[in-house]
Image (cartoon, grey):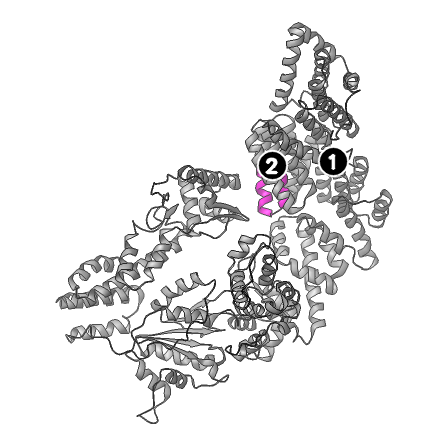
Amino acid sequence: MRFGVLGPLAVVTDTGEPVTVPGAKVRALLADLVAHRNQVVSADRLIDDLWGDDPPANAAGALQVRVSQLRKALDDAEPGARNLVESRPPGYVLRTDSVDADRFTALAAADDTASLTEALRLWRGEPYADVADAPWARAEAERLAEARLVVREKLAEARLARGEHALVVAELAELVARHPLRESLRALHLRALYAAGRQSEALDSYAELRTRLADELGLDPGPELVALHRRILAQDGTLSPPPKAALVRNSLPARPDELVGRAEAVAELRALVPARRLVTLTGPGGVGKTRLATEVAGELSFPDGVCLVELTALRPGDTAVAELVLAALDVRETTGAGVAPDDRLVAVLRHRQALLLLDNCEHVIEPAAALVSRLLRETTGVTVLATSREPLGLAAEVLWEVPTLPVPVDEGDLDAVRRSAAARLFAARVAARQRAFRLDERTGPAVARLCRRLDGLPLALELAATRVRALGVDQVVQRLDDRFRLLGTTQRDVPERQRTLTAVIGWSWDLLSAREQAVLARLAVHHDGCTLDAAEQVCDADVDVLTRLVDRSLVVLDDSGPAPRYRLLESVAAFCLDRLTDADAVRARHAAYYTALAEQADELLRGPGQREWLLRLDAEAANLRAALGHGGGLRLANALTWYWFLRGRFTEARRALALDGDAAARARAAVWRIGFTLLQGGVVTGAETEAALAGYADGRASWFVAAALVDRSELARAGELLERARSAGADPWVEAAVCVTRAKLAHAASDLAALERDSARSAALFAELGDPWGRLQATEWVGGLAELTGEYACAAALHREGLRWAEELALWPEVGSKLSWLAWIAVQTQDHRQARELAERAYRLAVEQDSPAARVFAELSLGIAARREGRRDVAVSHLQRLVDSGGDDALFLPMVLGELAYAIADEDPARALALHARAYDVAVAIGAPRDATGALDGLASAVPQPQVAARILGAAAAARSTRVPRSPAERDEVERVVARCVAALGADGFAAAYRAGQDLCPDEARAQADSFLVTAGPAGSRR
C-alpha cells in the first residue's frame, strides 16, 4: 500500500486502486502518522494534533475509534493492511516504506536531470494540502516545499547550461513572484533574462529585489547578487564561463566499511550542506562525526572539489589552521614571501566553489572559528563542513548534533533488536572478525543490554565488538563495569586517541578548565541526569559552566520532559567518577537534596499539584534510588511511600522500608511496610499489625493498612482500622480516603444508602482538596452506585471520565481498573464484543503493571464476556484460574463461581449445581446480598426439577432489592429458566410455584437444592 502526501492525502493499493479514508479526523490521523512514519507517536500528541484545545470528553476513546476506522479502511482495500498501523506504547506507529515524499527525497538528492525531473512528477499540489495549516504538519510541509524549490533551481541551472534561456525565464517567472526574496532563485532568473537578451528586465528585477529587501528586512542584496548585477551592467559576455580546473578533486579517504544506521542523517545533510555555507556536526567523542561527515562529503559534488583537513595534527591552542588547510589543498609557497597564510588562503579560494571539511576543531576552536569567519566573508563559493565537540560560535553556523545510535528497548523482541541501528552496527563489526556470529535468540538479549549500557555510542560499540571473539557477548556485557580496561583495540589504522574509550573521553576532559572538570565529575554522581537546581545545589554548578559543558558535548541537555535535564552518557559518567576527588561530600549533598525533594512531594502528592509532582519524581526515580543507598536511608523511604503506592512499586517500597533508621523512622516504616506486604498477598499476622499500629498512630497509615485488608477480604478488621484512622485526627484527606473504602464495602454489601452517602462525601472532600487520585477513587464508587441501580449509561460515563484522569496521571493499574469497569458494564448491557476488547486491554495492562487486583477484575470480565459470546473453553480457562487463585472469602469469588457454573452447565450439570450452591454460601459469609440473590438465580437454572426451580426463582425475586434490578444479561439467564419451567409446568403451574417461593427466605430457598447435591463433585474443583 502506497501513501501520497505531495498534494492532498492519497492512498492507493499495490495494484493502484484508490483507498477511501472516511472522515476528516481519520484522514488527519493518517496524515499525522504518515508525517511521523516508522516513529511511535504518543496518544497524547495525536489527541492534541487532532482536537487541539477542544478535545472530546473521552479523548483516548475517541482516538481509538479513529484508529479502528483507519485500520478498517486500509484492510477493506487490501487485506492485512490494518497491520500497518501498530499499537506501540505510548501510542501508535505507521510502518511503511512506500511514501511518495521519501521517493522524492531520494530522487532530489541525485544530480542528473532525469532523476530531478522524475522527482517533480511525483507532485500533485501543495504537500499535506488537507492539513498543511496544522502545527504538526507545517514543518514537514515547508521542508518538502523547500526541497521542491531546490530541485527546480537545479533543473533551471542545467537548462541554462544547455542554452535554454527563454524556457528558464518562463519557468522561473512564477517562482520568483511567489518567492520574491529568495536570492538564489533571483540570481538564476537574472542570468536567464540577460542570456535571453533582456538586459533591461534583468536590471529592473534586481532593482525590485533591492527595494524589497531594504523595505521589508532592512538588508542589502548578498555579495553574489551584487557581483552578478555589476557583470550585467558591464555586459559581461562570460556569465556562464567554462568550468575551471578543480582546485582539488577529492582528498577524502576511501570508505573503510559500511556506515550503519545513518541513512536518514546522510540524506538530511546531503540536502543541507550545499544550501548552507557553514554546517557543524557536533556530538560527544566516538559518536561518529568524522565518519558521517566524510560519507556526506563523498556524495556531494563541488566544481573545485572536496578537501578534508585533519586538525588533530595541531596541538591544542595552535594557531596554524590556515597553514594546515593550504597544505591539504597542496598550495605551495612560490611567491609573495611574507604574505600571511590566511591572506594567501583567501586569495586561493576567493573565486572557487569548493567544500572544506574541517575535522576535529574543538582543540583549536578559536583560530578555526576566526579562519572560517573570514572565508565566509571574503569568498562566495566556499562551503565549510566542520566536525567539533563544541560549536564554532559563528552567526552563519548551522549546528547539526550527531545523535548516538538508537538502542533496542525490548531485549525480548528479536525483530526490534535486529532493527536497532546500534545492534546492527555491533553485529556487523563482530561478524567482520567472527564469520559465524549471528544476531539470534541466543545473542539478541545480550547485544540489546550491551547497546543500552554503551548508550548507542558507535566507537564504544566497535571497541566492544573487538572483544567478542575472545570473550563472547555475555562476558563482554558482564565486564562493562570495568569498561575502560575492556574497551580498547590494537588496530593499527585507528588514531591513537580512538584506540581506547579512556583516550576518547580523555581528549575532551583535557580541554576543560579545572572548574569545569570539577563540576563534570560531580554531575556523574547523578543517575539519569538532573535538573538545573540539582546541579547548582549538589555540584556547585552555574549556568555558564553547564552551558560550556553542553557546548563541548560532554553533557547532554534533554528538554523533552517536564523540566530540562542535564545528562551524561554512561561511559562519560564512569570516566568522571574515577576523577571525583570529593566523592563523600558530593554524595552526602546528593542524598540531602533528594530527601528534601521527596519530603516536599509527600504532602503535595495529595493535592492539586499531584500530576506535576508524579512526573517530577518519575524523572528523578534513578536519583531517588541512589540517594537511598548513600545517605537518604529510611527517612527518604518514608517520604516516598505514597509515591510508590501511586506508581504501583510495592516491592521497591517494601525493600526500602526495611532499611535501618532512628526509632521514629522505623515505627513509621513498619506500618507502611505491612500495608505493602498485604497488597502483595504476603502473610501478616494480626499481632504484627497491631504492634506496628501501636507504635505509629497515624490516620493515613492506619487507613492504608485498612484498605489493604479490604483487598484481602479481612472486612471486620478493616472496619475497625477505618474507624481508628478517622478518629486519629482532623485530617480531611484521611476522612475522604476512609469514605472511599467504606463506599467500596457498601458496594460489596449492596448497601445503597451507605454507598450513596460515603461515595458522595468522598467525592466532595477530594474535590475540595484538589486530589486527582482521590477524585478518581470516589468517582469509581459513584459509578458503582449507578451500575447497581441499573443506570448503565451514567455509570459508563463516570468510568470513562475516571479512565481519562487515570491516563493523564499515568496510573496504569487504575487505567486497567477503569477498563475493567467499562468491560463489566458492556457485559451487563450485552455488548460482548466491546466487553472482550476492553477486558483484553485491561488484562494486558494489569499483567504489565503486576497489579493483582486489576488482573482479577480484568480476567473476570474476560471470562464472563467469553462465556456470553459462546467461547466456552476460553471462559472456563479464565474463570477456573480465578477460582484456584482466590481465597474462600475473596469478594469476587461468588460471581466467579456462578459464571463458571453457567459455563460448564451443559457438560457437567452436577458440578454446575455445586458451584452455584457454593457461590451462595460464600456470598452469605462475606455479606454480599446481591451476589447471594444472583446465586439463587443460578441454582434455579441448575436444579433438574422445574417446580423447585420456580420456587427458587420466586425466593430470589422476593429477596432482591427493588433498587438493585437485574441487568439485561442477568434477565436473559432468568428468562431461560422461566421458559424451561413454563414448558414443563404450564403457565399456571409455574405461577403457583413462583408465588410459593416468594414466601421462602433465601436460606430456605438455598435448601431446596440440597437434595440434588448428593452426587455433585467438589465445588470449584476440576473433574
Dot placed on the residue nearer the N-terminal end, 2 or 1: 2
- Counting from the top left corner in percent of width and height, residue 636 is at 73, 58
CA gap between label 2 and label 1 equals 20 Å
Badge 2 element: helix
Pick whichever, 293 or 210, lies toward us. Answer: 293
Horizontally, residue 20 falls left or right of residue 749, namely left
In which quadrant will I find the N terminus? top left
Residue displayed at 30% across by 51% down: 123
Of the residues tagged 2 and 1, which is closer to the observer?
1
Judge whether 542 appears above or below 38 on screen.
Answer: below
Q: Residue 202 lies in what quarter of the image?
A: bottom left
- In this picture, is 134 found above or below 722? below
- In the rendered image, residue 819 lying in the magenta stretch gets the answer yes
Extreme residue toward the front, this view: 436
| Region rendered in magenta | 799-820
User: What x and y, as percent, mark residue 264?
Assistant: 43, 61
Residue 58 spot, x, y in % from top left? 53, 39
The residue carrying mark 2 is 839
Residue 884, which numbered label? 1
Number of residues whose C-alpha sits closer than 10 Å to that of mark 2, classed few (under 14), some (14–19) or many (20 or more): many
Residue at the image position 76 percent from the left and 12 percent from the top? 999
For label 1, the crowd category at 10 Å Cα-Cα, with few meaning under 14, some 14 to 19 and many 20 or more, is few
Amino acid type at image mark 1: Asp
Q: Secondary structure at mark 1?
A: helix
